[in-house]
Amino acid sequence: MSDKIKDSVKAKIKTFPKKPGIYFFKDKNQNVIYIGKARSLQNRIKSYFAPTSDTKVIRILNETRDIEYILTGSEKEAGFLENNFIQQYQPKFNLRLKDDKSFPYLKLSLQDLYPGLYLTRRVEADGSKYFGPFSPAHQARQTIHLISKFFGIRTCSEKIPGIRKRPCLEYDLKLCSAPCTGFIQESDYRDNIKNARLFLEGNVEKLLKISRESMKKAADKQEFEQAAQWRDLIHTLENIKEKPKMTSVGLDDKDIIGFARKKEKSALYIFLMRKGKVIESESFMEKENIDFSKDELLFFHLRKTYKDRKNCPDKILLPFSPLNKQILQDEISHLAKKSVKLLIPNKGKNRKLVELADRNAEIVLRETNIDLLPLEEAQRVLNLERNPRRIEGFDVSNTGGEESVGSVVVFEDGHPRKQEYRKYKIKTVKGPDDVASLQEIIQRRYTRIKHENKALPDLVLVDGGKGQLNIAKKTLNHLGLENLAVVSLAKRDEIIFTPTHEQGLILDRTSPVLKLLQHVRDEAHRFASSYHRIKRKKRSFESELDGISGLGPKRKSLILTKYKSLAEVKESPVEELGKIVGKKVAAKILEKLK
């Protein structure tokens, strides 16, 4: 990290709150390279810049170009969110938590005649009630012990009714009521289950009061061992009360919306919860007419956000009711091709989630003025008619002309809008002709935008030099879009070409304008390359399976969906592969591969 970049990042850190949250270190391509949690975001991130001999910290800082954060309600909550995001992003410098092992939960098997309490790391839709997650893990085990001790709930998998004639050691230790031998009636056991649920659901105020009084009495009598047991129970109860908001014990799919407004600017912040875990966040900022009410602004924000979203949740939690809520709900449901509910929670865990999203929206709004500075500078440097708040970047990828693909990425106010990214399979160009391929995807992109009457960008950026710039300009002119601003950025020397800078414009390597254009260009390249790799892998996969009778394109596609590589196919049992293509064809495939 150069001194200029370090000074810039340090200045940004000074604006961070001294509150709990998680933080993201990002490299020059805006890839997340490290995620951490903090009790105080500002203090924790500052500590990385203190003199150190820690090689990991030094390596992280050498690659860091930006730092971002998300506020949470508590340090414990930050820990759960950190776990979710590490599993989602798989940062190179996070060595822990990168597998799918999650925090432990407690499972109360309510579907059983005599429910048991068990430790698990997976939440499933099996009729059980789940509680947690717990951190550290020993709190989950301690809670099982307390439930068994106070309520006699079993922790074994013994069948009921079974063949056991006398209870096990757990009964003698007063850790189970022995339902397996009929020592307790079903109705009495169910009452114990109800009380245990109250305990696990956090309705423990009465039990806390009794426990504190009992601890004091035991201490007064100098029964310190007994007092210590009551103390441990109190600690467990207090930890149960602190429920994490960022993880649900259901398998919920929902978006949590936060909204903030200041004068003519408004911001939307979204937590994406999938299968009960917040795995991603997004933010959007708009400059609107100051005469709009906040319910009108929320309506416009939501309509724009969900118009092109492919992965809609079942529920969208809102801070307040937007204008024409029912119309908007019907519109989003129609686009998602399923029922989507717009809900305004008034209390409880969902309300706290929305309030947290609101606070993050306020941060987006506060930082917007800083983010818009490179855009204002870009308008001046590139001689544009207006501030390039919406930029669309194009790139092409192929290998010797094979499997040619293209991409378009969208940035608004300097931030990617990934739900608007699009990828293209080149249809009209043969061989390695990047210029002609670029012409095709620009033609297809803006023909469709014009047909659908969608908003045009303020700036089009293409990867390449004069040739790419000229073909982009020619294509747009042919479409009647001659007023649309276009620039190109050449990789080797990072030269910017524009219609007014035909010989090229070279900016300082630390220029925020250059960094913005590089970010858009590199993101378009990443998106195109990833699509090209998928196409190339599919072709390679299918070619290895050519010539096998009974194996057509559809069956090849089914195999590719099921298996990640030919090695996996090769190691697959014939019975398993036979479920997809039939046993005879499966045997032929394995014979050819082996």
Image (cartoon, helix red, strand yellow):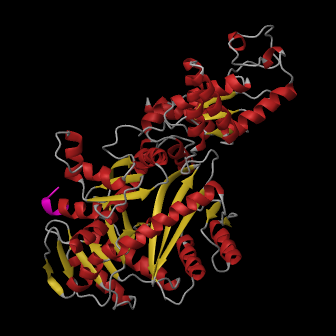
In this view, the residue in front, 515 or 400, is: 515
Residue 541 seen in the current view:
yes
Magenta portion: prevailing SS class: helix
- Above-or-below relation of 102 to 393: above
**Residue 326 location, x and y as percent?**
71, 75
Residue situated furthest front in the rendering: 220
Number of callouts: 0
Q: From the viewer's perspective, tell me whether residue 158 is left or right of residue 211.
A: right
**Residue 576 location, x and y as percent?**
59, 32
Residue drawn 24% across the image and 61% down it: 9
- Above-or-below relation of 169 to 415: above
Residue drawn 56% across the image and 70% down it: 306
**Residue 246 location, x and y as percent?**
53, 51
Numbered range of the magenta stretch = 1-5
Residue drawn 38% across the image and 58% down it: 69
Q: From the viewer's perspective, tell me whether residue 197 is left or right of residue 276.
A: right
Does 193 lie within the magenta span?
A: no
- Above-or-below relation of 478 to 21: below
For the N terminus, the quadrant is bottom left
Q: From the viewer's perspective, tell me whether residue 508 is left or right of residue 220.
A: left
Does 4 lie within the magenta span?
A: yes
